[in-house]
Each structure stands twice: as structure tokens, then as C-alpha cells.
Amino acid sequence: MHPLKLIIGNKNYSSWSMRPWLAAKSAGMHFEEQIIWLRHPETSAMIKATSAAGKVPILIHGDIMVHESIAILEYLAEIAPQLWPEDRESRAHARAISAEIHAGFLPLRRNCPMNIKRRPKAIALDDETLASVERVVDLIIDCRTRFGGGGDFLFGAHFNNADAMWAPVVNRLHAYDIKVPAAVRRYMDAVMATPMWREWEAAALEETETIVDIDSV
């Protein structure tokens, strides 16, 4: 079988890159990693040399190239089916909340960009951002209540693609010291305690370059 290669942005800021990286690690997959530094003069040309979409992450598997985080997660789940829940209802809900976080929550993403290095500190949040936070809290509590019995993650004992999609939100809630119910905080702590989160975090903390004009990449 051809080896996997994952092209990502630098780890402190690239929330989209974090998602498939965590998923692949959680499934025990071995892959080559290539980092392209974001917001540099050569960034766009380097990415477009591989993908015309011009964004990271990009998964390469032999002659197959997949872009978009959510599509990469689906491809990884074809190799490691445990990345989605086993039963149909849980799997459908996992895909639904993954798609929602992929497409929505723009106020939260815009005003609280992922920043692994940031020491938790609250900022003033506008009404739109607070509405995003409220929806995040409701989704996590609902998912944990309906599907999370017997484990610490959204769908129980195993970290899966849905947790990977929500991981950057965990960082946002933590880094901007956003007050959440205890049940949500317990979920956040469980995600942040995983070996793959800690590996990503350690690498992010070692990064020395910075990005100018950061957005929700």
C-alpha cells in the first residue's frame, strides 16, 4: 500500500490542518508530514503546486490527492472505519455535526482564531459570537447526552472524526477562557489530554515563526 502524506499549515494556527492530523493519529496511521508556513509570500504558490484549491490540508495517497478537511476525514475512515461510529444513527449525527462545524460558526472562528500558544484570557465577545458559543455548548451537551455514554468523547469511549472536527473549537473555548458548563469543560479536558493533542500542542509551542493578518485557516 502506498504511504500516506499529509500537507498541513503550521500547527499553532492551522485549525483545518489539525483535524485530519488528529484523526489519523488517533487511528494509529503512519503518514509523512509536510508543513507549509501560512501567510508567507511563497505560501500560495507552494500549496497550488499540489492542489489548485490553494488551501491546506492536502492528503496524498499514491496517485490520489484529497483536499478539504472533511473530505480527508471521509477518506481516512475508508481506511480506518472506526473513525466513524458503528451504528447508523450515531454515524449520521457525527457526520451532521461535523458538517455544521465545517460550514458554520463564522463569528467564533473570526473573533477567536485558533492559537495553541495563547494563555487562556477572556476577551469581549459580541452577540453573534456568543450565539455561536451557545450553539457549540448545546451541540456538545446534546451529543454527549445522547451518544457519549461510557466514554469521554462525543460518541463514547473512542475519539473519532467528529471529535477531530471539533478539536479547534476546544482550543478556542480554552484559549479565550470562554465560560462553559462543567459537562463541556470535561469534554474539553478529555480531548486536550489525548496523546495526539499533546503531540500537536508540543510541536506548536516549538514553532518560532509568526503569521501576519491571521484568519480562520
Image (cartoon, rainbow, N blue to C red):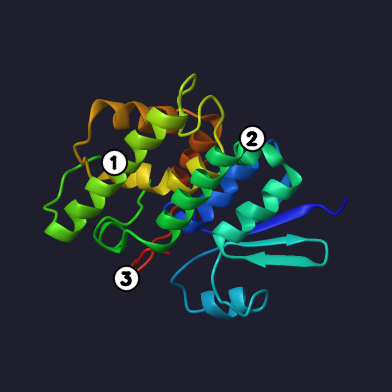
Nearest to viewer (mark 1 / mark 3): 1
- The amino acid pointed to by label 3 is Asp
6 sits to left or right of 42: right
The structure residue drawn at horizontal position 54% and vertical position 40%, both measured from the top left corner, is 89
User: Is residue 184 something that shows in the picture?
Assistant: yes
Choose between 158 and 37: the one closer to the eye.
158
Q: Secondary structure at mark 2?
A: loop
- The amino acid pointed to by label 2 is Glu
Choose between 193 and 104: the one closer to the eye.
104
Residue 98 image offset from top left, x and y in percent? 48, 51
- The amino acid pointed to by label 1 is Asp
**Residue for badge 2:** 86
Alpha-carbon span between mark 2 and mark 1:
23 Å
**Residue for badge 1:** 138
Check residue 205 in the rendering and tell me which mark sits there, or answer none: none
Check residue 213 in the rendering and tell me which mark sits there, or answer none: 3
Work out whether mark 3 precedes mark 2 in sequence or the reverse, and give the earlier one. 2
Q: What crowding class fits label 1: few (fewer than 14 Cα within 10 Å), some (14-19), or many (20 or more)? A: some
Work out whether mark 1 precedes mark 3 in sequence or the reverse, and give the earlier one. 1
Choose between 73 and 29: the one closer to the eye.
73
Residue 36 image offset from top left, x and y in percent? 56, 65
Residue 62 image offset from top left, x and y in percent? 82, 62
The structure residue drawn at horizontal position 20% and vertical position 56%, both measured from the top left corner, is 129
The structure residue drawn at horizontal position 49% and vertical position 34%, both measured from the top left corner, is 198
- The residue at the far right in this view is 1
